[in-house]
Image (cartoon, rainbow, N blue to C red):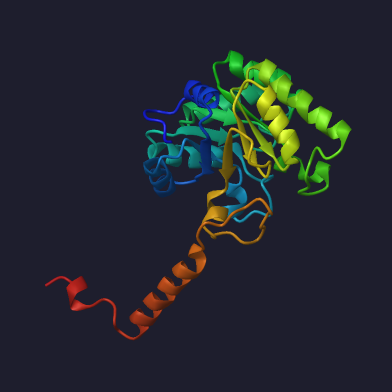
Amino acid sequence: MQTSGKVTTTKLLQMKSAGEKIAMLTAYDYPAAVLLDQTGIDIILVGDSLGMVVLGYENTLPVTIKEMIHHTRAVKRGTARALVVADMPFLSYEVEVSQAVLNAGRLIKEGGAEAVKVEGGSEIIETVSAMIRAKIPVMGHIGLTPQSIHQLGGYKVQGRDMTAAKKLRADAFALLAAGAFALVIECVPWPLAREITQDIGIPTIGIGAGPHCDGQVLVLHDLLGLYDRIRPKFVRQYVNLSPLISDGIKQYISDVRESRFPGLEESYE
């Protein structure tokens, strides 16, 4: 079922209450945003994953606030219905609370985002609270937090033992208390994600967290088969566009070299 009208943070809460699943995908440019918005996606995340799938970085850590604003602005131009959420990149919110609020405000004011997403739990609660006092909606992100890959020792499932599971629960409810409107849960065992989803009063968006979250998110390039450097277990590739695009380009090259393109029908009298 697709909700009608503009998607807001309030509507997402209503969807959770009604048992309606929330669909979320990433986008980094205007054409993708237009396409996603027209298909009825609920949330468009301008993820810092753009560093890997668009800019070619090894991971998300080099992404800057300037790059996030640039791509968020493009996505916002192509979006009418979906809620646009922008990732806060590494070191844009972890050091100084005042600087974090300023950077979040830039994503809203300059980029056109309608909310920001931050990674972490109890250690960033003061920052989340300050953003919300500044009237900036915040989506939390717990579990595997890609900006912490060096600290975590790589891309690993989180919350598998009792101590880690209790910490993730505590982080989830700390973010709730601070005022977060939704929570991404990444790479945790599905029973833990189900438990948090059932007990918490805000929507949970899963990625590698099983089927019981209130919604799901994937990186668009993973879904479309446009990025193959990393292929997590939780990715379902719905279509593989890479060979189709490659075949089309090869045909174009051949047509140019053999003088089959352009033809007179593609030329002016």
142 displayed left or right of 241: right
Quadrant of the snapshot with the N terminus = top left
In the displayed image of the protein, which residue is found farthest to the left? 269
Q: In which quarter of the image is residue 244?
A: bottom left
For residue 153, above or below residue 250: above
For residue 191, above or below residue 50: above
In the displayed image of the protein, which residue is found farthest to the bottom? 258
Quick one: 208 or 131, which is closer to the camera?
208
> Which residue sits at x=58%, y=59%?
227
128 displayed left or right of 165: left
Residue 59, horizontal then vertical, whole percent? 68, 50
226 displayed left or right of 96: left
Residue 201, horizontal then vertical, whole percent? 63, 20
Quick one: 27 or 6, which is closer to the camera?
6
Quadrant of the snapshot with the C terminus = bottom left
> Which residue sits at x=48%, y=33%?
84
Q: Quadrant of residue 176?
A: top right
Residue 45, horizontal then vertical, whole percent? 53, 38
> Which residue sits at x=72%, y=21%?
173
